[in-house]
Image (cartoon, grey):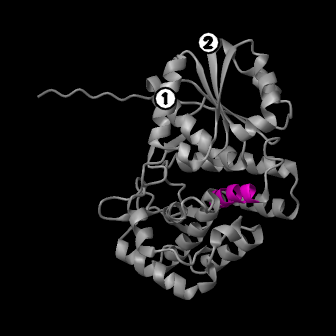
């Protein structure tokens, strides 16, 4: 018997550009010699508000540009929508010598990134995130995903954009609700990887200056990449609980609001199983209240359904639910260097959920989705 063994190193590099220019002049700096044409997916709402400026900026490239407007709600991250859009790109003639551009929030970014990664085994991708959530999370670690018929973000690849253009102009008019979704994710990264980021969040809450926000964005990207280098799923503190809450609300509860409630719950679970330092739950709860983040769960949620959702989480296996936990702030739990998760059983989670509700009834609320809007 003869054996051949090879190793392959497919390098992926990405440039992050953080900008405040309201005319989007950075677009002129795209090296258009690399792309024959540009196919631009743009969120309909973004197009209404910024379309003229965006088109003016891209027109200076003297490049053939095709705009595709998308009503970017959660339903577009489906297998049916994926198929429809792949067929559209095939009809339009997208090739590997063209560039695919995504301009919008996390939903649009997730879909377009996934399409770029699988179409012809990968086409060049440029991302222009227009929400703070997309700027600090969806575009920062090569995560691409769509939903299965039953699970959020179950289907995905790891595929970096060539360039990510982050402009604070887009987020200057975002409502408090949208900003809270992003700050929930940023807070999560601060607990996992960056005490500096946590300090910046507290500073920004007291005095919301643009220069501090730019520091937050920059520091979040650094933290996100550091965690991704451990494991692409090692950033999912609170997500195993949170994705279940989000999905069972039919996405009426925002992603960040669901994740932040899940994060607090994961920290309490960590204390219960002697992984997380005692007192971290109360300390975290106070910080979240200070930062205006959601800590509550829907009072009528069915814990058996929560368990079923958690069992289909990407980190889970056929015999355990695997959680991202922390020993303390900036000290993620690792069972071993290659497995940064805490494995547990469904019955243990179910018992914990019931005890959590009994112990903290104030964290459960009727009509939660309406309250959070």
Q: Answer few, some or many: residues within 10 Å of disc 1's Cα (few below 14, many 20 plus, some between 14 and 19).
A: some
Of 5 and 66, nearer the camera is: 66
**Residue 137 horizontal/vertical position (percent):** 63, 48
Q: Quadrant of residue 348?
A: bottom left
Residue under circle 2?
A: 36
**Residue 15 horizontal/vertical position (percent):** 66, 31
Q: Secondary structure at mark 1?
A: helix
Residue under circle 1?
A: 86
**Which residue: 61% across, 63% down?**
253
Q: Is residue 50 magenta?
A: no
In the image: residue 237, left or right of residue 206: left
Region in magenta: 177-189
Of 241 and 372, nearer the camera is: 372
Please, is residue 179 above or below residue 64 in the view?
A: below
Of 262 and 272, nearer the camera is: 262
**Which residue: 71% across, 76% down?**
286
């Amino acid at each position: 018997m003869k054996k051949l063994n090879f190793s392959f190193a497919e390098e992926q590099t990405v440039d992050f550009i953080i900008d405040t220019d309201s005319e989007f002049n950075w677009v002129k700096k795209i090296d258009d010699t690399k792309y024959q044409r540009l196919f631009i997916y743009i969120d309909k709402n973004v197009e209404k508000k910024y379309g003229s400026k965006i088109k003016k900026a891209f027109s200076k490239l003297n490049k053939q540009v095709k705009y595709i407007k998308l009503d970017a709600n959660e339903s577009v991250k489906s297998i049916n929508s994926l198929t429809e859009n792949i067929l559209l790109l095939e009809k339009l003639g997208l090739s590997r010598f063209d560039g695919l551009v995504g301009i919008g929030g996390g939903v649009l970014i997730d879909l377009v990134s996934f399409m770029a990664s699988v179409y012809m085994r990968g086409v060049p991708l440029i991302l222009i995130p227009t929400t703070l959530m997309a700027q600090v999370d969806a575009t920062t670690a090569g995560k691409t995903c769509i939903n299965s018929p039953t699970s959020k973000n179950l289907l995905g690849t790891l595929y970096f954009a060539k360039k990510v253009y982050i402009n604070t102009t887009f987020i200057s008019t975002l409502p408090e609700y949208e900003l809270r979704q992003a700050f929930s994710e940023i807070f999560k990264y601060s607990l996992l990887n960056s005490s500096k980021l946590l300090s910046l969040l507290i500073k920004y809450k007291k005095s919301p200056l643009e220069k501090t926000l730019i520091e937050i964005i920059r520091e979040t990207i650094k933290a996100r990449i550091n965690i991704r280098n451990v494991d692409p799923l090692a950033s999912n503190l609170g997500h195993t609980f949170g994705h279940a809450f989000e999905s069972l609300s039919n996405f009426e509860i925002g992603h960040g609001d669901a994740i932040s409630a899940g994060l607090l719950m994961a920290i309490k679970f960590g204390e219960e199983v002697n992984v997380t330092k005692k007192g971290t739950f109360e300390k975290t709860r106070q910080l979240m209240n200070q930062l205006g983040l959601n800590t509550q769960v829907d009072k009528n949620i069915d814990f058996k359904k929560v368990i079923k959702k958690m069992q289909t989480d990407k980190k889970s296996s056929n015999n355990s639910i695997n959680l991202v936990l922390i020993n303390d702030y900036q000290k993620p739990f690792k069972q071993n260097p290659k497995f940064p998760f805490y494995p547990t059983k469904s019955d243990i989670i179910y018992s914990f959920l019931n005890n959590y509700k009994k112990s903290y009834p104030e964290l459960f609320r009727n009509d939660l989705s309406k309250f959070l809007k």
